[in-house]
Image (tube, rainbow, N blue to C red):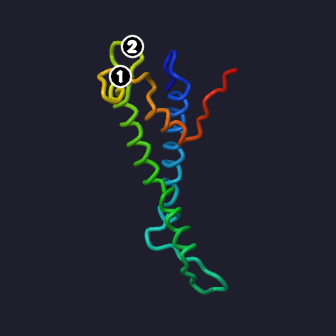
Amino acid sequence: MSVVNEHPAVAFLREAHEQAEARARAASEPAVLLWPSQPVEFLLAGQEVSTPETRAAEAHIRLHMPEAVLRRVEAERAVLADHADVADGAGRCAVCAEPGSATRLAWPCPTVLGLARAWGWVPAVTS
């Protein structure tokens, strides 16, 4: 979903959300059994191993399960909608303002730029 004259960070973020949603939906469709519903068991020579490292690996796996990805994408889309450019097209965030002032921050605001950076967006370097 590309919008004419959309800021590159916002276009990147929207595309990242679309791709993550598509991948999560595709991953959850073939077999629910692929994703653990019980604690993940790590085996070494046929014996279950439970260490801080294996528990961290299990937490990481759960963080990237399709349902978790879909929840994060939905939440980030809501943040993006809240922090939209004000309706008058002034290029200002609908939420963020200068500290101690009613002056709205330029759009996209630091919140939106931060979301885009979390997905891998890097601002273009100008010389």
Q: Is residue 26 left or right of residue 45?
A: left
Within 10 Å of the Cα at label 1, are there few (<14), some (14-19), or many (20+) other Cα atoms? some
Amino acid carrying mark 2 in the image: Ala
Identified at 42% across, 17% down, the residue is 91
Identified at 61% across, 34% down, the residue is 122
Distance from label 1 to label 2 (Cα)? 10 Å
Residue on which the image places disc 1: 104
Q: Position of residue 30 (x, y in %)?
A: 52, 56
Identified at 34% across, 27% down, the residue is 97
Amino acid carrying mark 1 in the image: Arg
Q: Secondary structure at mark 2?
A: loop
Identified at 50% across, 28% down, the residue is 10
Question: From the viewer's perspective, is residue 69 above or below residue 84?
Answer: below
Q: Position of residue 1 (x, y in %)?
A: 49, 26
Q: Secondary structure at mark 1?
A: strand
Q: Tell which circle, 1 or 2, labels the residue nearer the N-terminal end.
A: 2
Q: What quarter of the picture does the C terminus occupy?
A: top right
Viewer-side label of 1, 2: 1
Residue on which the image places disc 2: 90
Is the Cβ of the residue at disc 1 closer than 8 Å to that at disc 2?
yes
Q: Position of residue 64 (x, y in %)?
A: 51, 56
Of 122 and 16, which appears nearest the observer?
122
Question: From the viewer's perspective, is residue 36 above or below residue 47?
Answer: above
Q: Is residue 19 left or right of residue 82?
A: right
Q: Position of residue 33 (x, y in %)?
A: 49, 66
